[in-house]
Amino acid sequence: MKHMVTWSEIPVSDMERAMNFYREVLSVDFKREDMGGYDYSMFATDPEAVSGALVAGEGYNPSMDGSVVYLDGGDDLSEALNRITRLGNQVVVPKTAINDGENGYFAQFIDSEGNRVGLYSKG
């Protein structure tokens, strides 16, 4: 098994708002598709990378409870966290060192849709 997680889906209520938020925070683009009545905006990543999508549709309800998806926070997590607060969103777990920074850093925030989402970076 190469990766324990192979795909992630982040529920959204307003796809345009969510795409704009994640574009600003992560400097990422999306490939948007209708998949059987569900509105999918897939993170544009390297084809070999584990990725995911923003999803709107029945049964996809944004929430601060439940599983937490950790996204790549770039080279320095502080930059993404600064963009999150500049957009008026809440950082609920600040940049936190894992093993004194030996294993990188993580943080959690509330996205534009009300989901609790994590970020990870090596710096």
Image: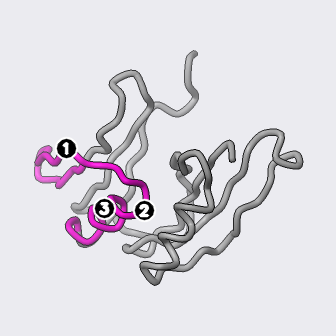
What's the CA distance linking mark 2 and mark 3? 26 Å
- Let me know if residue 117 is in the magenta part: no
| Three-letter amino acid code at the position of disc 3 | Gly
Tell me where the magenta segment starts and ends, as one range. 15-41
Colour scheme in the image?
one colour
- Which numbered tag is attached to residue 59? 3
Give the side of residue 106 with respect to residue 33, left or right: right
Amino acid type shown at disc 2? Val
| Residue drawn at x 35%, y 61% as measured from the top left | 11
Which of the two discs, 3 and 1, sits closer to the camera?
Answer: 1
- The residue type indicated by label 1 comes to Lys
Q: Residue furthest top?
A: 1
Mark 2 vs mark 3, foreground winner is 2
35 in magenta = yes
Q: Secondary structure at mark 1?
A: strand
- Disc number placed over residue 31 in the picture, else none: 1
Q: Quadrant of residue 39?
A: bottom left
Answer with left or right where residue 74 lies relative to residue 59.
right
Q: Secondary structure at mark 3?
A: loop
**Earlier along the polypeptide chain: callout 2 or callout 3?**
2
Assign a secondary structure to mark 2.
Answer: helix
From what the image shows, is residue 8 above or below residue 55?
Answer: above
State which tag comes first along the sequence, 2 or 1.
2
Q: Which mark is residue 25?
A: 2
Q: What residue is at 44 percent from the left and 70 percent from the top?
A: 111
Question: Residue 20 got which mark?
Answer: none
The reply to whether callout 2 and callout 1 are in contact (CB within 8 Å) is no
Q: CA distance from mark 3 to mark 1?
A: 21 Å
